[in-house]
Amino acid sequence: MIRTFAWLLPVLLSIASASAQQDRDSINLRFTAQTRPADLGKLVMVSEDRRSDAFDLPVNHLSEPETAPGRLFRLEPERQALPLAQVRLPETGDDFVVLLVSGDDSPYEAVVIPYRGDGFRPGDFYLHNVSSLPVLGSVGATEFVIAPRSGRVVRPSGARDERFYDVLLGVREGNASRAISQSRWPVASHTRTYVFFFDDPVRRDVGFRAVDEFVPEEDP
């Protein structure tokens, strides 16, 4: 019996190897960061047996698609073996956005979001809170609360006829809440927006900033 099926082993190993290679080669990642040092330079993705080409890490838009070396890898500066973040991708899916936010135990923490799907559509906002306080507020009629070190998609509603949302942002301190911003955000069916909340050492308060991603509009 062993001799009869011995020939199957190399075939199965070859299939598994080809499948793993195809899986790795087909994973596209787009990066952006909450912040980055001016002297950081280009980054590379490094797995146990692969190293990607070097790429720039933008902070005001998403990077061009980069091919992941696997579903588990680390980010390093191109010219220095210094781990900046470990990235673990979901077991399924082949197209992701990787948000790099300030980490607790490493320079960056990777937040992985599926690039496609109904969970994050044109006109939506992804809010991620890396501040030390809960963030709360409303975008139009949609209310939200986001705990520290977490994020969520907010689908706005209740736009005014002038095609903007009334936006109120605030933080919770103990049992009290206070506003940090009151503004208007335009209705934009051709963008998705990533908003980072963080502790601002200059203002000594929670700050925020946004990154827009231009995407095709949905069919009516």
Image (spheres, helix red, strand yellow):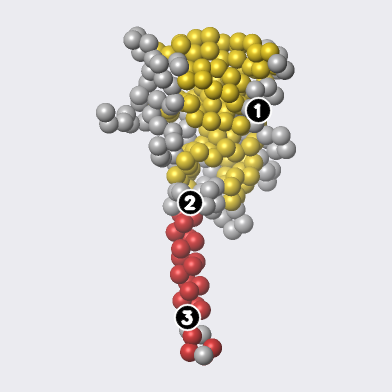
- Nearer to the camera, 74 or 198: 198
Q: Which residue is mark 3?
A: 8
Q: In the visual, does 82 lie left or right of 161?
A: right
Which numbered dot is residue 92?
A: 2
Q: Earlier in the sequence, mark 3 or mark 1?
A: 3
Which numbered dot is residue 148?
A: 1
Q: Residue at x 58, y 47 (%)?
A: 88
Q: CA distance from mark 2 to mark 3?
A: 27 Å
Given the image, on which type of amino acid does mark 1 rest?
Answer: Pro
Q: Residue at x 44, y 59 (%)?
A: 22
Q: Earlier in the sequence, mark 2 or mark 3?
A: 3
Given the image, on which type of amino acid does mark 2 rest?
Answer: Thr
Q: Residue 82 occupies which quadrant of the picture? A: top right
- Nearer to the camera, 36 or 120: 120
Residue 85, position as x, y percentages in the image:
64, 41
Give yes or no for contact between labels 2 and 3 (Cβ–Cβ under 8 Å): no
Q: How many marks?
A: 3
The residue furthest front is 175
Nearest-to-viewer mark from 2 and 3: 2
Q: Residue at x 32, y 29 (%)?
A: 217
Does residue 8 lie above or below 50 as drawn? below
Residue 151, position as x, y percentages in the image:
57, 31
Which numbered dot is residue 46?
A: none
Residue 203, position as x, y percentages in the image:
68, 12
Nearest-to-viewer mark from 3 and 1: 1
Does residue 126 lie above or below 157 as drawn? below
